[in-house]
Image: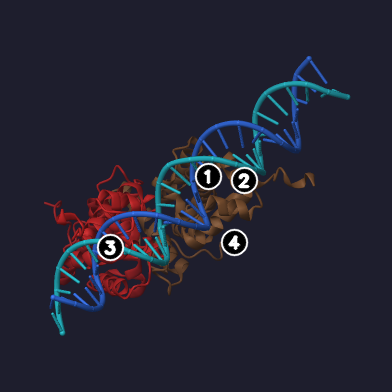
Chain colours: A red, B brown, C blue, D cyan
Amino acid sequence: MVDTYHHGRLRQQVLASAAEEIARSGPEMLSLRELARRAGVTHGAPAHHFGSRRGLFTALATEGFEALADALAPSVARGDFVETAVEYVRFALSRPGHYAVMFRPELLEDTPSLREQRDRAAAALASGTASLPEGRIGIPVEQARHAAWALVHGLASLVLAGALADADPLALTRAGAQQLFGSPPGDEHSRPRKAEK
Amino acid sequence: MVDTYHHGRLRQQVLASAAEEIARSGPEMLSLRELARRAGVTHGAPAHHFGSRRGLFTALATEGFEALADALAPSVARGDFVETAVEYVRFALSRPGHYAVMFRPELLEDTPSLREQRDRAAAALASGTASLPEGRIGIPVEQARHAAWALVHGLASLVLAGALADADPLALTRAGAQQLFGSPPGDEHSRPRKAEK
DNA sequence: GCTCGATGTTGTCAATGTCTAGATCCGTGG
DNA sequence: CCACGGATCTAGACATTGACAACATCGAGC
């Protein structure tokens, strides 16, 4: 009976089922009390870990940005822009519950750790676009970076919203990234990784 | 005294203040009862017009798609792709409350009129990308269309989320659209619209 | 071994979405 | 002229929720 007074992993478990639930029904429908029930704990318990509803969203977003930065790191290190774009979208689709909350400032508190992880992800993204084929860019670098971010964010959002249901998201991302920075499919600079043979 | 039992424009007024409130605090924080209060009406009144909370969101989204289709029509008719992109973003930024709800299927009911207006907007978007400079596209047309949509949707979303606070959204859109389809800023094909006649 | 902070419980409160039943208004056909 | 029916709004009720406060229990470190 001593087993259950302190749950032990309440924080992790609540975060996990929150991500599940948000992925299924969106952030608005999420109920703290329901999460507590699902974790076998009383309704007040989650508050000790997250403070409030927004605190929970903030924790989720922080986790999300951290994981995003990690996901982007390898391809960024390799200077492979197209693959960084693909990784971005792959991340969003593999963690829909987290992604649904990461760009919703109204749901988030301005925590230092959130800021930190968000900056880390932003930095990864920035150096990802730093490795772009120089001559191909006809607009200021800053704008190119924003455009690239917008492209992948837009793709992820639309796919998650079910607006591009009948498309292969990752192939689409690859194609979009190549189109944006002007590498024709047969170009020697950055070819599609799989087709083209 | 007879004035106020039937409000007369309750539906319009609720929609308007809902858009305001959503623009300020997001869809989650919206309270039907608060809207009723603001309209000087009892808490049950809005239900007769929208049925439920989701009904209200659906009505807003429907209005939004209708206005979007209208906003895109002129530039689409002119075959001016870059300007269509700009109009898309301009629309989203000028009606943040509507746009915040248009791509959130969890908040929407599957109404015939919603479907209708959404299709209308989608059709506008599709013919907008139909007028792209042929030689510039190195990927399948379908993918190019999706990429273009993702770009403008991503730009609008990020700006609305405050993630691109320090950029000029419309200039950024113009640049992004040009970059995506390879028209250098000074190209004769699609210059910024200013002196058309 | 004791204390103190972290974690979890229990009870409470105001607010909300939704439902139902009834009141009021308005156009329309007899 | 009027009665009737539908549309609009009111009024009351109910379950659920987020937040808060007071208390119980556990565990780590002095």
Q: Tell me if residue A138 can be seen.
A: no
Of discs 3 and 2, which sits in the foreground?
2
Q: Nearer the viewer, residue C17 or B191?
A: C17
A25 w.r.t. B195: above or below: above
Please provide percent x and percent y for residue B138.
Answer: 27, 55
Chain letter for mark 1: B
Crowd around label 3: few <14 · some 14–19 · many ≥20 (10 Å): many
Regarding mark 1 in the picture, which secondary structure is present there? helix
Of discs 4 and 3, which sits in the foreground?
3
Which residue lies under the disc numbered 3?
A182
User: Contact (CB < 8 A) between labels 2 and 1?
Assistant: yes
Give me the C-alpha separation between circle 2 and circle 4. 42 Å
Which residue lies under the disc numbered 4?
B197
Which residue lies under the disc numbered 1?
B59
Chain letter for mark 4: B
Q: Nearer the viewer, residue A135 or B6?
A: B6
Of discs 3 and 1, which sits in the foreground?
1
Q: Tell me if residue B126 can be seen.
A: yes
Of discs 4 and 1, which sits in the foreground?
1
Give me the C-alpha separation between circle 4 and circle 3. 32 Å
Please provide percent x and percent y for residue B156.
Answer: 43, 61
Amino acid under disc 2? Arg
Q: Does label 1 lie on the same chain as label 3? A: no
Q: Does label 4 lie on the same chain as label 2? A: yes
Please provide percent x and percent y for residue D8.
Answer: 66, 40
Please provide percent x and percent y for residue A155.
Answer: 32, 55
